[in-house]
Image (spheres, grey):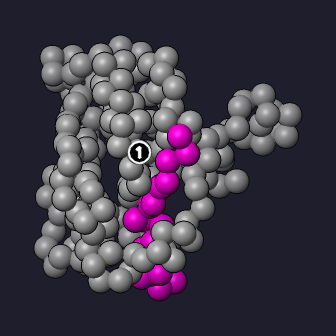
């Protein structure tokens, strides 16, 4: 998407599982099966090369909902593909719509709105096809541009989010005696 919300490019690919296995919970959440991914999926390197090339070419503001998870999952995929990580190498700016929703929450059951909750709040209708990567990306973009239109996202909001940093190496964590998973989840 461009700065005004115009669609510039859209691709949707499945990654063939060759160096990982799907958990039953993941298969249930995403509605995918191993057989489907083996049949319809492309090699990880091919998919990640396309993403890498687009990030280098467009150098976008990278927007996501629970972006810290996406950021680290993409980092793992770039690493497993033997590709440099343009998210880190280019220092691409990032914005997490989930982190912004903290301002809409009262101290109740949760700190942030889930993507479907944000979508419902913004548009007054349920989000369809949750946990489908393309549907989630489209819903996140729609929410981002609607939040921008209503003034909830402005230059101050964009500047207020600290950049997402790559996790430290296992060696650095071991030296500091801190568990890696706490960094990965953004708890440290």
User: In the image, residue 57 lies at what x, y percent?
Assistant: 36, 37
Which residue is found at the position 22% from the left and 31% from the top?
13
Query: Which portion, as a residue range, is magenta?
Result: 90-108
Q: Is residue 108 visible?
A: no
Local crowd at mark 1 within 10 Å, few (<14), some, or many (≥20)? some
User: In the image, residue 21 lies at what x, y percent?
Assistant: 38, 22
Answer above or below: position of 97 versus 168: below
Q: Quadrant of the N terminus?
A: bottom left
Q: Which residue is mark 1?
A: 59
User: In the image, residue 104 lies at what x, y percent?
Assistant: 42, 82
Which residue is found at the position 18% from the left and 53% from the top?
7
Which residue is found at the position 54% from the left and 69% from the top?
159
User: In the image, residue 140 lies at what x, y percent?
Assistant: 29, 60
Q: Is residue 183 visible?
A: yes
Answer above or below: position of 67 versus 100: above
Within the image, what quadrant is residue 117 found in? Answer: bottom left
Answer above or below: position of 105 versus 181: below
Q: Nearer the viewer, residue 154 or 128?
A: 154
Q: From this viewpoint, which residue is outermost toward the front?
A: 57
């Amino acid at each position: 998407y461009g700065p005004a919300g115009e669609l510039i490019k859209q691709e949707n690919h499945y990654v063939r599982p060759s160096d990982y296995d799907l958990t039953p919970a993941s298969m249930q959440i995403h509605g995918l099966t191993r057989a489907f991914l083996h049949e319809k999926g492309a090699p990880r390197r091919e998919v990640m090369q396309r993403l890498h090339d687009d990030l280098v070419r467009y150098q976008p503001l990278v927007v996501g909902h629970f972006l810290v998870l996406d950021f680290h999952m993409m980092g793992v995929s770039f690493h497993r593909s033997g590709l440099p990580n343009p998210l880190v190498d280019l220092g691409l700016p990032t914005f997490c719509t989930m982190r912004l929703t903290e301002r809409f929450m009262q101290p109740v059951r949760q700190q942030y709105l889930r993507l479907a909750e944000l979508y419902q709040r913004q548009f007054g209708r349920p989000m369809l096809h949750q946990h489908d990567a393309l549907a989630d990306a489209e819903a996140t973009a729609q929410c981002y541009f609607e939040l921008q239109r209503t003034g909830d996202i402005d230059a101050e909001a964009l500047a207020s989010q600290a950049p997402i940093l790559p996790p430290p190496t296992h060696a650095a964590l071991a030296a500091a005696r801190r568990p890696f998973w706490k960094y990965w989840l953004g708890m440290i």
